[in-house]
């Protein structure tokens, strides 16, 4: 009887280990993906806040066609973008003169407050392109400039490359104070 009890207990322990080995990874995946992909928003006082896709989708969305001109005059990535205006993502009372947008590949773009707040050229953190949302949209979160006509040429935006503002795979937005 003692041998039979030890065998049953061994099977029970093996069964529990198997359940734990299967259930725990599923639970971890569920918990970490419930709110979807995220970015980090860093304020001038050093505080940081994580913003998830679920949180962004609770803010007003802007959906418009968009495309930009690069430094060679070519037009890039035409399509329908959906995202949250940076002015809605960043507290309107937050002090900053520029934002530094950082991408997963190390690319950085510094953008002046006047451009971020320009109502004629609304700047969004796009989370969907042609109806495909992150993480399925492989460009990830992306800065997009979406005037009513959808086109951002170098000449009208007053830059050498309007495309340089369209940062893809954004992971962090840092508010900065100028000198």
Image (cartoon, helix red, strand yellow):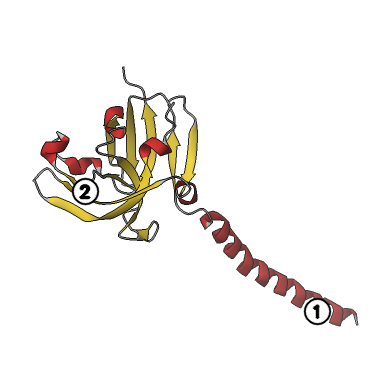
Question: Residue 63, percent across and down?
Answer: 32, 51
Relative to the observer, which residue lies in front, 25 or 131? 131
- The quadrant in which the C terminus is found is top left
Give the residue drawn at x 33%, y 43%.
124
The vertical placement of 132 against 49, above or below, is: below
Judged by depth in the image, the label closer to the viewer, 1 or 2, is 2
**Between marks 1 and 2, how big is the CA–CA gap?**
69 Å
Which corner quadrant of the image does residue 132 belong to? bottom left
Question: Residue 131, percent across and down?
Answer: 34, 61
Name the residue tied to disc 2.
150
User: Considering the numbered disc 1 on the image, is that residue within a helix, a strand or a loop?
Assistant: helix
Give the residue drawn at x 39%, y 40%.
172
- The quadrant in which the N terminus is found is bottom right
Which corner quadrant of the image does residue 163 belong to? top left
Lower position in the chain sequence, tag 1 or tag 2? 1
Which corner quadrant of the image does residue 157 belong to? top left
Residue 8: give its label.
Answer: 1
Give the residue drawn at x 21%, y 48%.
150
Count how many numbered circles sit on residues in the image: 2
């Amino acid at each position: 009887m003692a041998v039979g009890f030890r065998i049953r207990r061994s099977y029970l322990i093996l069964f529990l280990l198997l359940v734990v080995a299967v259930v725990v990874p599923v639970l971890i995946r569920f918990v970490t993906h419930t709110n979807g992909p995220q970015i980090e928003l860093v304020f001038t006082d050093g505080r940081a806040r994580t913003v998830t896709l679920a949180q962004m989708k609770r803010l007003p969305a802007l959906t418009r066609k968009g495309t930009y001109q690069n430094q060679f005059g070519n037009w890039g990535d035409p399509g329908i973008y959906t995202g949250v205006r940076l002015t809605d993502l960043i507290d309107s009372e937050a002090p900053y003169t520029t934002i530094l947008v950082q991408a997963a590949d190390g690319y950085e773009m510094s953008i002046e407050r006047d451009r971020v707040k320009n109502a004629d050229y609304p700047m969004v953190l796009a989370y969907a392109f042609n109806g495909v949302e992150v993480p399925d949209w492989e460009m990830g979160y992306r800065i997009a400039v979406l005037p009513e006509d959808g086109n951002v040429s170098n000449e009208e935006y007053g830059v050498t490359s309007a495309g340089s503002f369209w940062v893809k795979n954004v992971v962090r937005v840092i508010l900065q104070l100028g000198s």
